[in-house]
Image (spheres, grey):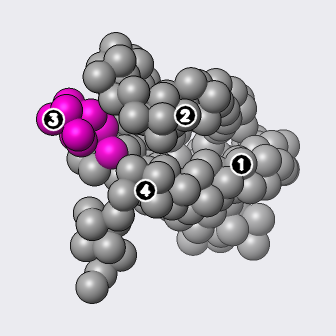
């Protein structure tokens, strides 16, 4: 079975644990390093036409928004689901789906700032590590949103 198939068959508790360890913990590790690298690249290469100006500020904003979002899930929504209170979770799930749309919009802005994560030919190691890390973060966040929307939240919408 693939990981997606395993998660489809997982209980709500198992799925939530997967989300917490695979995505929430991972984002909390990724973002501080990405912000640090973005600050360095902007400082050192600010005069370069391909420099992702404003990237560190955008990542800081994303980190704040994501942390607030994850805290709501961890402190309110996920415990509600684990306690079998899914019938009461419709409103919070709708709010989380809306915030997921905002995260997707933030990812689109990240793509614009970085010109689709396109490195200039002479990009230094920090710039290369930054864009590699951003690609991983982008893919992880998209998978995180899909896992919650398509697996966990669809169960709540369906009354399971």
Residue beneath the point at 28% across and 50% down? 151
Residue 14 x, y percent position in the rendering: 46, 60
Q: Nearer the viewer, mark 4 or mark 2?
A: 2
Q: Horizontally, is 140 left or right of 5 in the view? A: right
- Residue 85 drawn in magenta: no
For the record, the magenta segment spans: 152-160
Q: Which residue has dot 3 on it?
A: 158
Q: Is residue 131 in view?
A: no
Mark 4 crowd level (few <14, some 14–19, many ≥20, 10 Å Cα): some
Quadrant assignment, res 86: top left
Mark 1 crowd level (few <14, some 14–19, many ≥20, 10 Å Cα): some
Q: Which residue has dot 4 on it?
A: 15
Q: Is residue 75 above or below residue 94?
A: below
Q: Which residue has dot 1 on it?
A: 28
| The disc label shown at residue 77, or none | none
Residue beneath the point at 76% across and 65% down? 126
Q: Earlier in the sequence, mark 4 or mark 2?
A: 4
Could you say whether the residue bearing mark 3 is in a helix, strand or loop? loop
Q: Which residue has dot 2 on it?
A: 79
Q: Nearer the viewer, residue 92 or 59?
A: 92
Answer yes or no: do the residues labelled 4 and 2 have beta carbons within 8 Å?
A: no
Residue beneath the point at 40% across and 19% down? 92
Q: Earlier in the sequence, mark 2 or mark 3?
A: 2
Query: Distance from label 1 to label 2 (Cα)?
Result: 20 Å
């Amino acid at each position: 079975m693939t990981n997606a198939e395993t998660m489809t068959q997982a209980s709500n508790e198992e799925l939530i644990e997967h989300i917490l360890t695979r995505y929430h913990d991972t984002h909390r590790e990724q973002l501080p390093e990405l912000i640090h690298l973005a600050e360095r690249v902007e400082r050192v290469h600010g005069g370069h036409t391909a420099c992702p100006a404003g990237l560190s500020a955008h990542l800081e904003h994303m980190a704040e928004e994501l942390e607030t979002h994850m805290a709501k899930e961890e402190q309110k929504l996920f415990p509600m689901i684990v306690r079998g209170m899914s019938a009461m979770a419709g409103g919070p799930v709708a709010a989380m789906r809306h915030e997921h749309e905002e995260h997707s919009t933030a990812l689109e802005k990240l793509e614009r700032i970085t010109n689709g994560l396109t490195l200039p030919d002479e990009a230094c190691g920090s710039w290369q590590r930054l864009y590699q890390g951003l690609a991983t973060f982008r893919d992880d966040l998209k998978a995180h949103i899909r896992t919650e929307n398509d697996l966990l939240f669809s169960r709540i919408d369906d009354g399971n």
